[in-house]
Amino acid sequence: MSAYWIAHVTVHDPAAYAGYQALAPKAFAKFGAEFLARGGAIRDAWKVPSSSAMS
C-alpha cells in the first residue's frame, strides 16, 4: 500500500532548516521514502514558498 505526503514549507530560519536538510535524508531512506517532486513546477503552480511530494 502506498502513502503520499505533500508538504508546503515556509522557511523562517534558513540555518535551522539547513540542519534539517542535512539530517532528514537518513530518516527518509530508513523507511524507503522517495521524493517524487521538490519545489520547481509544483511550487510555481501552487503558489506556495516550497513544496515536496513523497511516496
Image (cartoon, rainbow, N blue to C red):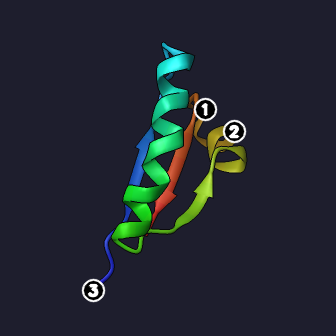
Classed neighbour count for the residue bearing mark 1: other residues with Cα under 10 Å, few (<14), some (14–19), many (≥20)? few
Above or below, comparing residue 8 to residue 24 in the picture:
above
Identify which residue is drawn at 51% across, 21% down: 11
Q: Residue 52: percent from the left, percent from the top?
A: 52, 49
Identify which residue is drawn at 49% across, 30% down: 19
Q: Residue 1: percent from the left, percent from the top?
A: 27, 86
Residue pointed to by mark 2: 44
The amino acid marked with disc number 2 is: Asp
| Towards the viewer: 27 or 9 | 27
Identify which residue is drawn at 31% across, 71% down: 3
- Callouts 1 and 2 close, C-beta under 8 Å: yes
Residue pointed to by mark 1: 47
- Give the quadrant of residue 46: top right
Classed neighbour count for the residue bearing mark 2: other residues with Cα under 10 Å, few (<14), some (14–19), many (≥20)? few
Q: Which of label 3 and label 1 is nearer to you?
A: 3
**Marks 1 and 2, how far apart in space?**
5 Å
Element under disc 2: helix
| Towards the viewer: 28 or 1 | 28
Q: Which mark is residue 1?
A: 3
Residue 33 in the figure: left or right of residue 46: left
**Marks 3 and 2, how far apart in space?**
30 Å
- Give the quadrant of residue 14: top right
Identify which residue is drawn at 41% across, 61% down: 28
Above or below, comparing residue 55 to residue 16 in the picture:
below
Q: Residue 12: percent from the left, percent from the top?
A: 48, 13
Element under disc 1: loop
Residue 46 in the figure: left or right of residue 2: right
**Marks 3 and 1, how far apart in space?**
30 Å
Question: For the C terminus, which image quadrant?
Answer: bottom left
| Towards the viewer: 31 or 6 | 31
The amino acid marked with disc number 3 is: Met
